[in-house]
Image (tube, helix red, strand yellow):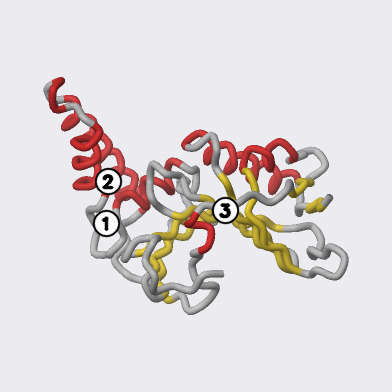
Amino acid sequence: MTVLHLADEGEAADLAAFLSRLLHYDRGAAVRLQAAGTALAVFGRPPSFEVLAVRAVRLGKPYEEGLEVTLDVTVSAGELLETVDESAGTVVVPGAVTGPPWAGVLPPRGGWRAEPGLPAPDALGALVAAVVAEFRSRTGELPAERRTRDELDRIGRDIWSRTVGDTRLPVRAVHAAQSLGFLRPGEPPALFSSGAWLRLRTPYGSVAVRRAGLGALDVSVR
C-alpha cells in the first residue's frame, strides 16, 4: 500500500475537491498520477470539455516507495477520492487500472513559453457567461424534431471551438477551468504554449489542450 503524505490539510481538501468535480462529469473517471520529489501531478479529462485538467499537489515529504523514487500510475478517481484523509493530510494510492487513451498522451514537462493576448479575468468570466447563455438559447429554440444529439453537438462545437481574445485558446478551455474551480477572483491566469499544446495556468490548476486534438500522433507518449 502506497501512502502519500500531503503538505497540509489544505492540499488534501483541494485534491478531494478536484476529484469530486471530475467525478461530477464522469462517474467512472480515471486519473493519472505522477509523483517525484515533493510534487504530485494529477491528470484528468472531463469528457464534457475535451481538455486535459492538471492539478498540482504539494507533498509533505519526498515520494519514495522501496527502490522507486518516482510514481507513475493511472487509477480510479473515485477510489482515490475515498482514500483522501483531510485531517491526516494523506491519500492512499489504489490499484492501477487500464488507462483510457488520453492517459498515454500528456503535455511536455518543459519548453513552455508565455503567450500574449489573454483577456483580463473579469472579461474571461463574462465571456464564459455569454457563451453558456448562447448555447442555452440556441438549443432551447430547436423544435422537438431537431433536438438530437448530433444537432446539440454541432451547436456545441460551433460555440466552444471559438478562440479567446487574441489567442489560439478555445473557449471550452476557459469554461473547463471555471467549472473545475481553477479560475478565482484576484488570481489572473496565464497562457503558455509548447509545441502543439496550449496551457491555461492558474495557482489552483491548469487546463491543457492540443490544437491538433488529443488523439494526434505528433506527441510523445509517456
Relative placement, left or right, of 1 versus 140 is right
As shown in the figure, which amino acid type bears the numbered disc 3? Gly
Is residue 114 in view? no
Q: Which residue is mark 2?
A: 127
Q: Earlier in the sequence, mark 3 or mark 2?
A: 3
Q: Mark 1, residues whose alpha carbon is within 10 Å: few (<14), some, or many (≥20)?
A: many
- Nearer the viewer's eye, disc 3 or disc 1? 3
As shown in the figure, which amino acid type bears the numbered disc 2? Leu
Which mark, by number, is residue 164?
1
Q: Which residue is mark 3?
A: 99
- Could you tell me how far apart the alpha carbons at marks 3 and 1 are, in whole angstroms? 31 Å
The spot of residue 98 in percent (x, y) is: 60, 51
Q: Regarding mark 2 in the picture, which secondary structure is present there?
A: helix
- Could you tell me how far apart the alpha carbons at marks 2 and 1 are, in whole angstroms? 8 Å
Q: Please tell me how many numbered marks the rendered image carries.
A: 3
Of all residues, the one furthest to the top in this rendering is 144
Cβ–Cβ under 8 Å for marks 3 and 1: no
Q: Is residue 5 above or below residue 78?
A: below
Q: Earlier in the sequence, mark 3 or mark 1?
A: 3
- Nearer the viewer's eye, disc 3 or disc 2? 3
Residue drawn at the location 48% of the way across and 43% of the way down: 180
Q: Mark 3, residues whose alpha carbon is within 10 Å: few (<14), some, or many (≥20)?
A: some
The spot of residue 222 in percent (x, y) is: 56, 69
Query: Is 3 in front, or is 37?
Result: 3
